[in-house]
Image (spheres, rainbow, N blue to C red):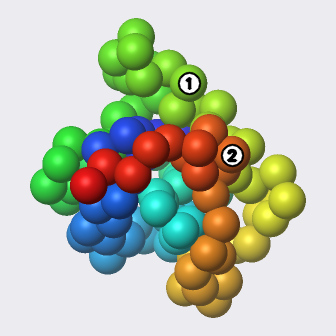
Amino acid sequence: TYVITLPCVDTKDKACVEECPVDCIYEGDRNLYIHPEECVDCGACEPACPVQAIFYEDDLPESDLDWKDINAVFFDDLGSPGGAARLGATGVDEPRVAALPPKE
Ligand code: F3S
Ligand code: F3S
């Protein structure tokens, strides 16, 4: 799976969403999250992000390894919705993201 990391928090550019062929990039309150089972590893989202927040899981910098779990845990309550457009903005965040201090 691909993984969204810290630079997305409070940025939410959403250019990535347009690129995803399976619509598996879901909107939280402060961040977007990639569904680890719905993602087909096409790589289209990664270059679209203007703040370089997206990484293939095996290419995550050591300091960003937690983000693989953060993206997965976001879906603990949602399961596999099968499409972000249909679900819409959830208004919630994974607890570790919700606890981050505001960026500005
Ligand atoms: Fe976030 Fe970058 Fe997508 S800022 S919403 S991961 S384009
Ligand atoms: Fe979607 Fe491909 Fe990224 S399936 S989440 S655009 S790697």
Residue toward you, 55 or 65: 65
**Residue 26 occupies which quadrant of the picture?**
bottom right
Number of numbered discs present?
2
Which residue matches tag 2?
Answer: 95
Q: Residue 71, how many percent across, how many down?
A: 60, 44
Q: Amino acid at mark 2?
A: Pro
Amino acid type assigned to the residue bearing label 1 in the image: Asp
Front residue of 49 and 94: 94
Residue 31 in view in this figure = yes
Placement of 69 over or under 50, stated as above or below: above
Rendering quarter of residue 14:
bottom left
Residue appearing at x 66%, y 50% in the figure: 94
Residue at disc 1, secondary structure:
helix
Q: Nearer the viewer, residue 91 or 24?
A: 91
The C terminus lies in quadrant: bottom left
In the picture provided, is 46 more to the left or to the right than 36? left
SS of the residue under disc 2: helix
Using the rendered image of the protein, determine whether residue 43 is visible from the camera's viewpoint.
no
Earlier residue among tags 1 and 2: 1
Compared with 84, 94 (above or below) is above
Q: Decide: few, some or many residues near mark 2? Use Cα within 10 Å; few <14, some 14-19, many ≥20.
A: few
Of residues 100 and 70, the one nearer the viewer is 100
The span from disc 1 to disc 2 (Cα, nearest Å) is: 12 Å
Residue of label 1 = 66
